[in-house]
Each structure stands twice: as C-alpha cells, then as structure tokens.
C-alpha cells in the first residue's frame, strides 16, 4: 500500500463511503468527530439548526462563549442565555463566559490525536497542534455538520514543512509562523494543508505547535497539522487526559505536493507590521520604534507557557506602557496563580483581564488615537482594534515583554526558565448535555436581542443592478462586517447590516444598497485578490445579502468566505481576465446571466461583455438557485 502522510491517514479514516482519497481539488465528504461554535457565530448557527428542524446533534458539539463578553446592556447576556438554553435542548456542551477562548479550551478538553472537526471560527485549525484535522467554516456549515456528522470540502494539497534545529533564546513559536507567513504570504496557503515534520517539530511543546497551526489561518490555509508524540502525551497528562493519547504520524516514505524547509537555529524574533499579518520584518529592524500599548493573549499566544515566559521577563520590573493580558482559559489563569505568576504580573503593573478574546476582537482594550499597539494576536487589520487611526504590530510574548519594559520595540535576548506547569482542576466549568429524555422540556430563552432569521428568495434568471462598491486587494471580513463594538448585534441581522456593513470603507453603503434593493435592483460587489480573507463570520455574507447584494466578482476569494457567500445565495464569480477589472466602475449598471450556472458566465457592462468564471463548486449550483443553503435544505428535507 502507498505510504500515507498524516493528513491522508486521518482523512481516509474519515472518508464517507471509504475508498481512496481523490486528487487535490475534488470534493470529499468526511465524518466529523466534533463541531463547535463560539458566541459571536453561534447564535446564527443555532437559529439555522432550529430552522432545519434538528432536535439533537450527532457529533460531540460545543457552544463556547468567549467573544461577546462585555455585558453593557442586554444584548450579549441575551445571546449567552439563548446559547445556554439551546445547548441544553439539542445535546450540546455549553462553555459559559469566563471559561476561556474556544480554541484553547478545545485542545485542553476535547481534541484527541486523529480526530476531525469543524468550528464556526477561522482559528479552529488550532487543533492541528494535537495531530487532528480541524477546519474553520461558516455557521451554516457547522449547523449542517451538527445535524449530519459530516462535512464536504475540496481535497486539499498536502505541503510538508520540515523544521530542523531548535528555538534559540528570545525566539518563540510565534516567530515560526511569522516566518511561514513571510514565505507563503496571506493567500499562498489556499487549498493547502501544511504538515509539520522533522526534528524541529518534535522539539516543540504541544501549545507551541498549536500557536503555529492556529495562525496558519492567516495564510489562507485549509488547516495545518503536527504529528503526536511524547510532547503530546505530556500535555494530555498535564490535563489528566493521558487516556486520550494515540500515536499518529506519517508513514515512512510518505509523499507531499511540495516542501518548505525552516532551520529554527537560524530564526530570530519577527514582527508583522500593520496592516497585515503578512508584512513580516525582523524585530531588530524595528527596534526603538515608540509603542503606546502591549496586549498579550488571543487564541494564538495565551497558553501557560506563553504567559509564564512573559511574566518571567517582567519579574521585579515595571511595565512603562498600558499592558493588558488575557489568559487563554480558566485553567491557564489557575495555573498562573498557582505558580505565582499572577502576583508577578500585578506587581509589574500589568492589567490582568478576563479569560477570553478581549482586545483581539475589539472588545475593550483599544489603543490611544494615533498610537501603536504591540500584540501577540494573529490579526492586525485596519480598525480591528477599535481605534481607527491606531496601528497594531504582531509579535511573540517575549518581544511583547521586552518592549513593555522599555516603551519601544525591543529584541529579547535572554532565555527564560519557567516554573513547571501546575496541575489544576477546572472540570466543573462546562455545562454537560442533559439526558435525551429531559431535553424536550427545556424552554429556549429568546430575549429581545434574538431576532428571527431573514427569509431569502430564489435566484432569478438574470441579475441586473448596480456595482455598489469597487474594492481593491485583500478585503478582509473585518472590512466587510466589522466586529468590535458591533458584536452585540450578531443576532440581529437587520441592525448589524444597517449599522456596520462596509461602514469603514463607505458610510453610504448600507443606505444606498437598501434603496437599490427596494427599487428591485440586484447589488454587485467588485474586488481583486484574496477577497474575504480573515474570519469565518458568515455575517460578512448574510448582511450583504440582506442589503440586496446578489453577486461578488473578484480576482480570487478566500476559502471560507466563498462557502459563506454560497450559503447565503450570493453568486461568487472571478474575472476570466483580470484586466477586465478596469472596465467596471462603481455605479455602473451591469447584468449577469445566471440562468445556467454550469460553465463560464457573462457580465454585460456598458455594452461590453466580460467573461466570468464560477468560484463555486458544481455541488453549490442547486443551493445558489434556491437562494441559499437554508432554503435549499428546507426544500429537500421537509416532507
Ligand atoms: C476573528 O478572529 O476575526 C473572529 C472574531 O474570531 C472570527 C469569528 C467571528 O467573526 O465571529 C473568526 O476568526 O472566524
Ligand atoms: Fe478570539 Fe481573537 Fe482568536 Fe478570533 S482570533 S477566536 S477573536 S482570540
């Protein structure tokens, strides 16, 4: 039998119908062992699950609350109460606010080597550090997986990343993934799974591996994975889960589509310069730049090791800039407390914040106007911090610590020795599913923030309307549908669309689009490369659809966003010739014949014909015709 790499092994063990894996690009359906959401994507996902008529989920399922944590007003608590009660009703584990960040909790408690999973958040790929294959997806896709226990995706290419050497003093796992971003770029990972092997990979701890797989999302990768070994076992033992260990590795002689080599001995501290995680430079080249703030945490860098290393550098000294710290989970916070680090942090002047996403998604912690914030997070897109003219650079926790002490970008040089990880028991944090017999009696709590899902009509034969916005490269979902202060509107599509959609780029967009929609027009968006990069938030498709957008025409899409567009009945198309981008302008009236979605399509602008290539799969055609995934599901499953 052909030797298999680890990705092929796990995928073929989960392939529905069995058999051999097809070549890259062909759609496969896999069995899903776990599906989860977080609060900012979870309410829509649960509303869709309810609309599907599902009364019990199939795979292990979890609803985590970690994003919308600021309870200033009824909206976020309403969302939490809805999620808690619907979890009880459908057999889903509920993780209340304060327990920690979904991805961190997932590796601490649920992921085992060899598992497959999907989550309604782009950093679900974090689980790859545990030798598991996990994908980020939009809320509808999670709902479908919870209902069926399956997920369909195009078979990715598997790229080998061979790590040699070991991390040198002052260098952390964050620098490895920043190095990858400097090689691959923010869209170079599309359609790929990065499988990390070699002695350098073996030298990393489990949470270091998770830092690397986590931020693979910023390369647009489908996911990333490490093999499991004694370091995986050591981590599971520290969580009282040794029984969940299974050795998982590639076969001897396994092959890959290509290989990237990184020598960890030669790696120095790196920094991703605002406004993209892909603008990577050496920290030494930025040393001395004045900073106004430091933030430590996020699902990328909030482990015990990360924060203990940060605290070790601070011991006996005071930070000189506003410094905020968000532990990844309650267990991490307890470990830090038991090892004495919480008091080190307080004594150094650090603001110890709640376990959760916090400043990473603009829930507090915004920097001063015109300021520069150094963050150990994974994204530094414009305005994501909540301060429009502030800049954010991304660094490791050691660079963050060295810089917090000086007030300027500083290269850490010394090695830090941290206290051994204390064992803690946080097992009472989750609300476990009720017995099946008790679920029917649960009353689902729907406060005034929980609005009904909008209904969408089927696709007409021709789309005729205006180009509502003409955009450039690398439009992120933070540009399309900002989070931050708007997170409390995640369960209210109309308000979220009217207040936030594209408001950072054009404050007239929502009103113009509504008027155009109400006059019977079909809104079209035009863009270039890597459209929809970043998060998995389906609101970046759902809200534009509510505003009457029916097609998006660009040079290239990011993976998760294109699936979300299809799920909400927006036709995703690419220019056959990118020079045609110059022939279309904002405000142009265009028409696209969508009567036949097989093969290329034609867009007519000003009497000129522009050829467009579908960015959807052939399996998506019926969904688009029905006006979206939910109308399609209902038409095909309701007897
Ligand atoms: C993010 O980091 O952008 C988020 C917030 O976690 C998103 C999900 C969301 O918008 O709810 C993600 O990464 O998918
Ligand atoms: Fe939360 Fe930030 Fe991670 Fe998104 S990237 S899940 S907002 S910590």
Image: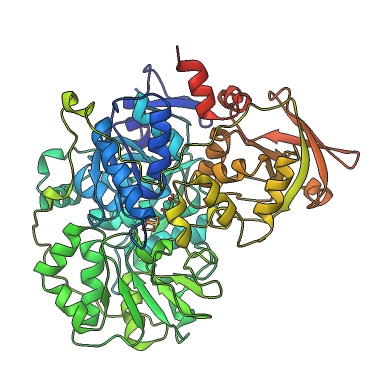
Image quadrant where one finds the N terminus: top left
Q: Is residue 83 above or below residue 325?
A: above
- Percent x, y of residue 90: 28, 31
Q: Is residue 437 above or below residue 404?
A: above
Instruction: Say which residue appears at 45% left-offset and 49% top-offset.
Output: 490
- Percent x, y of residue 635: 52, 18
Instruction: Say which residue appears at 62% left-offset and 36% top-offset.
Output: 570
> Is residue 528 visible from the viewing direction of this image?
yes
Q: Quadrant of residue 357?
A: bottom left
Looking at the image, which is closer to me, 71 or 381? 71
Of all residues, the one furthest to the right in this rendering is: 607
Looking at the image, which is closer to me, 524 or 611? 524
Q: Is residue 515 left or right of residue 104?
A: right
Q: Quadrant of residue 597?
A: top right
Tally the marks.
0
Looking at the image, which is closer to me, 596 or 362? 362
- Percent x, y of residue 359: 39, 66
Image quadrant where one finds the C terminus: top left
> Is residue 577 visible from the viewing direction of this image?
no
Which coloring applies here?
Answer: rainbow
Of all residues, the one furthest to the top in this rendering is: 639
Looking at the image, which is closer to me, 253 or 557? 557
Instruction: Say which residue appears at 34% left-offset and 49% top-offset.
Output: 78
Of all residues, the one furthest to the front in this rendering is: 448
Instruction: Say which residue appears at 51% left-offset and 71% top-offset.
Output: 273
């Amino acid at each position: 039998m052909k030797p298999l790499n680890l990705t092929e092994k796990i995928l073929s063990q989960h392939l529905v119908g069995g058999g051999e894996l097809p070549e890259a690009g062909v759609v496969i359906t896999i069995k899903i062992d776990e599906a989860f959401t977080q609060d900012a994507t979870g309410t829509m996902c649960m509303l869709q699950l309810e609309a599907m008529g599902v009364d019990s989920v199939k795979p292990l399922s979890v609803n985590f609350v970690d994003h919308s944590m600021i309870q200033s007003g009824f909206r976020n608590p309403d969302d939490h109460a809805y999620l808690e009660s619907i979890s009880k009703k459908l057999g889903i584990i509920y993780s209340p606010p304060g327990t920690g960040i979904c991805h961190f909790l997932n590796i601490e408690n649920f992921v085992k080597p060899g598992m497959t999973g999907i989550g309604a958040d782009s950093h679900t790929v974090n689980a790859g550090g545990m030798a598991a294959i996990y994908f980020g997806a939009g809320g509808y896709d999670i709902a479908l997986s919870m209902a069926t226990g399956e997920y369909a995706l195009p078979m990715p290419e598997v790229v080998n990343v061979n790590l040699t050497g070991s991390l040198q003093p002052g260098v952390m796992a964050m620098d490895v993934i920043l190095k990858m971003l400097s090689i691959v770029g923010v869209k170079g990972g599309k359609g790929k799974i990065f499988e990390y092997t070699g002695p350098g990979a073996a030298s990393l701890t489990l949470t270091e591996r998770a830092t690397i797989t986590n931020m693979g999302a910023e390369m647009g990768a489908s996911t990333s994975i490490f093999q499991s070994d004694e370091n995986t076992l050591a981590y599971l033992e520290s969580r009282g889960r040794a029984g969940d260990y299974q050795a998982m590795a590639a076969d001897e002689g396994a092959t890959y589509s290509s290989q990237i080599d990184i020598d960890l001995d030669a790696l120095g501290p790196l920094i991703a310069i605002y406004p993209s995680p892909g603008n990577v430079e050496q920290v030494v080249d930025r040393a001395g730049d004045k900073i106004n703030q430091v933030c430590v945490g996020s699902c990328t860098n909030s482990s015990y090791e990360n924060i203990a290393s940060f605290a070790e550098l601070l011991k006996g000294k005071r930070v000189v800039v506003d410094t905020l710290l968000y532990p990844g989970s309650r267990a991490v916070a307890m470990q830090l407390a038991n090892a004495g680090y919480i008091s080190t942090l307080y004594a150094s002047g650090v603001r110890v914040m709640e376990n959760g996403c916090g400043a990473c998604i603009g829930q507090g912690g915004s920097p001063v106007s015109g300021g520069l914030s150094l963050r150990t997070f994974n994204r530094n897109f414009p305005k994501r911090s909540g301060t429009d003219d502030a800049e954010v650079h991304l660094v490791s926790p050691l660079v963050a610590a060295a810089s917090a002490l000086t007030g300027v970008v500083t290269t850490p040089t010394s090695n830090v020795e941290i206290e051994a990880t204390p064992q803690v028991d946080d097992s009472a944090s989750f609300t476990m599913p009720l017995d099946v017999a008790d679920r029917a009696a649960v009353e689902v709590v729907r406060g005034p923030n929980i609005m009904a899902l909008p209904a969408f009509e089927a696709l007409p034969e021709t789309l005729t309307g205006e180009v509502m916005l003409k955009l450039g490269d690398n439009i992120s979902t933070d540009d399309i549908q900002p989070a931050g202060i708007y997170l409390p509107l995640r369960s209210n599509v109309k308000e979220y669309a009217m207040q936030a959609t594209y408001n950072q780029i054009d404050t007239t967009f929502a009103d113009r689009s509504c008027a155009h929609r109400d006059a019977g027009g079909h809104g079209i968006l035009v863009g270039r490369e890597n459209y929809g990069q970043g998060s998995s938030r389906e609101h970046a498709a759902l809200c534009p659809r509510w505003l009457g957008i029916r097609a998006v025409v660009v040079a290239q899409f990011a993976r998760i966003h294109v699936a979300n567009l299809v799920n909400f009945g927006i036709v995703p198309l690419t220019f056959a010739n990118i020079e045609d981008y110059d022939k279309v302008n904002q405000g142009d009236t265009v028409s696209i014949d969508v009567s036949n979605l097989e093969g290329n399509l034609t867009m007519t602008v000003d009497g000129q014909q522009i050829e467009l290539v579908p960015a959807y799969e052939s399996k998506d055609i019926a969904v688009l015709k029905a006006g979206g995934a939910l109308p399609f599901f209902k038409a095909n499953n309701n007897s």
